[in-house]
Image (spheres, grey):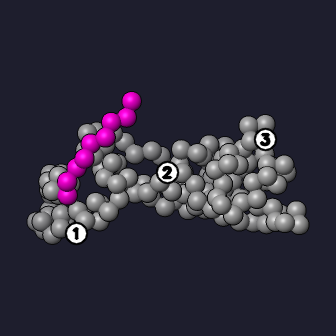
Amino acid sequence: MNITVKYEETDVAKALEKIIKDSNSAEFVKLLTPMLCKSHRGVDWFFKLMIGNQLPEIISKGTLCKIKVDHLGYGANKAAIANKYADADDKVVVTIKEFNGFHDYINYTIDYINVDEHDNDVKDYTSAEAQHLEIIIEI
């Protein structure tokens, strides 16, 4: 079951004040509060950390993963990719190119093989959510 809680900017500032122990903490709070509040995903993770939860493991650059063809980006020729490369679960192999952070839905940039209109393979990249990636070989 998911629940929704609304936090004010002042709630975030108070929480930051509790964890930042520095002689210049008030300035850090002024800097970080608006940055954190711009990302509702970032604020969600921040408060989960405040109550003792952990962030998911970060998948390293170069790690091979599988992802469902339907979760590839808009520029992917999904039908052709599914025909040429998908396994029985409609998943294809991709490579982690970059971790983009926990502050947004799109956590990773991935490399994959796209198929052009002439059925040629083309190296391409797109974005992926962490929850859609299945590690097959970790680097």
Residue 78 appears left or right of 38:
right
State yes or no: residue 3 in magenta.
Answer: yes
Q: Residue at x 49, y 61 (%)?
A: 100
Other residues around mark 3 within 10 Å, as few (<14) / some (14–19) / many (≥20) = some
Q: Nearer the viewer, residue 100 or 75?
A: 75
Distance in Å between CA atoms under marks 1 and 2 = 26 Å
Q: Residue 87 has which mark? A: 3
Q: Which residue is rendered at x = 50% and y = 56% of the image?
A: 107
What kind of residue is marked 3?
Answer: Asp
Q: Position of residue 12 (x, y in %)?
A: 20, 54
Q: Earlier in the sequence, mark 1 or mark 3?
A: 1
The residue where tag 1 is placed is 31
Q: Is residue 21 above or below residue 85?
A: below
Q: Position of residue 19 (x, y in %)?
A: 18, 52
Residue 58: mark in rendering: 2
The amino acid marked with disc number 1 is Leu
Q: Residues within 10 Å of mark 1 (few under 14, many from 20)?
A: few
Earlier sequence position, callout 3 versus callout 2: 2
Q: Residue at x 64, y 58 (%)?
A: 73
Residue 70, percent from left and from top: 67, 48
Q: Earlier in the sequence, mark 1 or mark 2?
A: 1
Front of the two marks 3 and 2: 3
14 magenta-colored:
no
Quadrant location of the N terminus in the rendered image: top left
Magenta region, residue range: 1-9
Question: Residue 98's x, y, as percent?
Answer: 56, 62
Q: Amino acid at mark 2?
A: Ile
Predominant secondary structure in magenta?
A: loop
Tell me how far mark 3 sits from mark 2, CA to CA.
25 Å
